[in-house]
Amino acid sequence: MIEQLFGSKTRVKLLRMFYSNPNRSFYVREITRKIDEQINSVRRELSNLLSIGIISSDTNNNRLYYEVNQKYEYFGPLATIFGEGTDSPSAGGVSTDSEMKAIKTLGNVDLALYTGQFTRDETAGIDFLLVGDVNQAKLNKFIAELEAKEGKEIRFAVFTPADFRYRQQVKDRFLADVLAGKNQVLIDKQKLFSPPGASSPASNNQKAKKDEKEEE
């Protein structure tokens, strides 16, 4: 039904991918691989979404990236239709569902987020943050598989819940930079993610979803 309303299966897949990953940027061949559609169809729909203003584009290292435009007039309503909350089993939508399932097998994971190369924000100095009690061997395997899939080295940091909370209390600079950066939260079971002074559309959208769940 959604495909009929929006006119194209590829378009619906793109909207789900972008709105489920509001802080991530993707290049064309990465998109075709993640949504499993032909490149010509993807290029056509990207052009349509770009002309409407639903997504924006930017060139980095001679590669054209696309991401959802959080300043778009109807960002909120579309995010409600196509986005997923971080606690949902299908959170992350098309692009991160399998990664979330893999992360959950690592152990008792309280918080997992992408930053750095994934969101094109190098202020954090890492690409992946994990908080929880995890199996080191499984984590090493996950990182190796993620590096193979992404075709690049993944910089990551792992904290126990106690260490994470201690670093928050002492206002650890490294952790503050990570949380204040451009992030995509994959898992947040204990509501640990709290970027200082966050007021971006994505942060507000995440907070609204959390508030709605608390009211239910």
Image (spheres, helix red, strand yellow):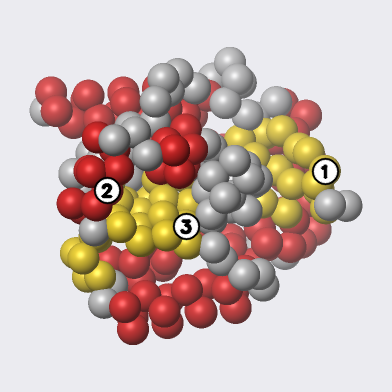
Residue at screen point 18% across, 31% down:
213
Residue at screen point 60% across, 20% down:
71
Query: SS of the residue at dot 3?
Result: strand
Tell me the kind of residue under disc 1. Thr
**With 21 as the anchor, is 152 left or right in this view?**
right
Label 3 to label 2: alpha-carbon separation? 14 Å
**With 120 as the anchor, is 200 left or right in this view?**
left
Q: Earlier in the sequence, mark 2 or mark 1?
A: 1
| Viewer can see residue 176 | yes
Give the camera-side residue of 95 and 198: 198
Q: Which residue is mark 1?
A: 59
Tell me the kind of residue under disc 2. Phe
Q: Are marks 2 and 1 in contact (CB under 8 Å)?
A: no
Q: Position of residue 171 (x, y in %)?
A: 34, 33
Q: Which residue is mark 2?
A: 164
Q: Position of residue 174 (x, y in %)?
A: 45, 44
Q: Is residue 13 above or below residue 151?
A: above
- Answer few, some or many: residues within 10 Å of disc 3's Cα (few below 14, many 20 plus, some between 14 and 19): many
Where residue 40 sits, quadrant-wise, is bottom right
